[in-house]
Image (tube, helix red, strand yellow):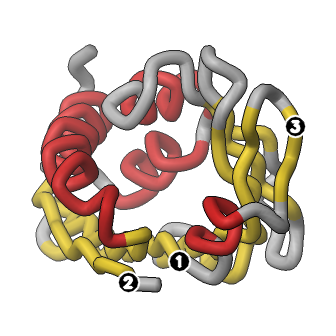
Amino acid sequence: MNRAVIKKSVEVHAPREKVWDVLLEDEFTRVWYAAFSPGTYAETDWKVGGKAVFRDDSGSGLVSKVMANERFELISVEHQGVIMNGTEDFESAEARQWKGCRETYRLSEKNGVTTLAIENEMPEEFRETFLASWDTALQKIKELAEGGK
């Protein structure tokens, strides 16, 4: 199974603590997750080893495991399966495509400017869609962290 990796970054004129909040707090994630699928939200406590479920309005999504959480510096999840019609699936061909794909966010700050670097591994067939979605999502993260809506 072929996989693609997208790497992108954005400079945000805000402290990394604020960018961190935008990455993890529900009131913000619902805004920028919509770049991938309307109504998407996360069910997780973001603790290492814990479960993270990402689902959208259609009842679809991903089931993941939190692999790293270094406050204000790094958050990483590894996808374990998919959600189809509201049901978690770890065995289908689609679930196996996503299993082991990582999504990582790194933050660094210099002179009041935070650089957010993302690395997103996915099945190759999603690459083109996710390229555009990430551009939108990163712009939303920037706007939210800098104080806009």
The answer to whether residue 68 is left or right of residue 5 is: right
Residue 38, how many percent across, how many down? 45, 18
Query: Which of pointers 2 and 1 lies earlier in the amino acid sequence?
Result: 2
Tag in front: 1 or 3: 3
Tag in front: 2 or 1: 2
What kind of element bears circle 2? Answer: loop
18 is higher (above) or lower (below) than 105 = above
Amino acid tagged 1: Arg
Residue 31, how many percent across, how many down? 42, 23
137 is higher (above) or lower (below) than 74 = above
Distance Cα–Cα, label 2 vs label 1? 14 Å
Please give the name of the residue rendered at 24% of the width and 72% of the height, measured from the top-left corner. 6
Question: Residue 2, which numbered label?
Answer: 2
Distance Cα–Cα, label 1 vs label 3? 21 Å
Please give the name of the residue rendered at 66% of the width and 68% of the height, measured from the top-left corner. 79
The picture quadrant where one finds residue 97 is bottom right
Q: Which residue is mark 3?
A: 87
Query: Which of pointers 1 and 3 lies earlier in the amino acid sequence?
Result: 3
Please give the name of the residue rendered at 22% of the width and 19% of the height, measured from the top-left corner. 148
Question: Residue 102, which numbered label?
Answer: 1
Amino acid tagged 3: Thr
85 is higher (above) or lower (below) than 125 = above
Residue 89, how many percent across, how many down? 83, 54
Question: Residue 29, which numbered label?
Answer: none
Amino acid tagged 2: Asn
35 is higher (above) or lower (below) than 104 = above
Crowd tier of the residue under label 1, counting other residues whose Cα lies within 10 Å: few below 14, some 14–19, many 20 or above: many
What kind of element bears circle 3? Answer: strand
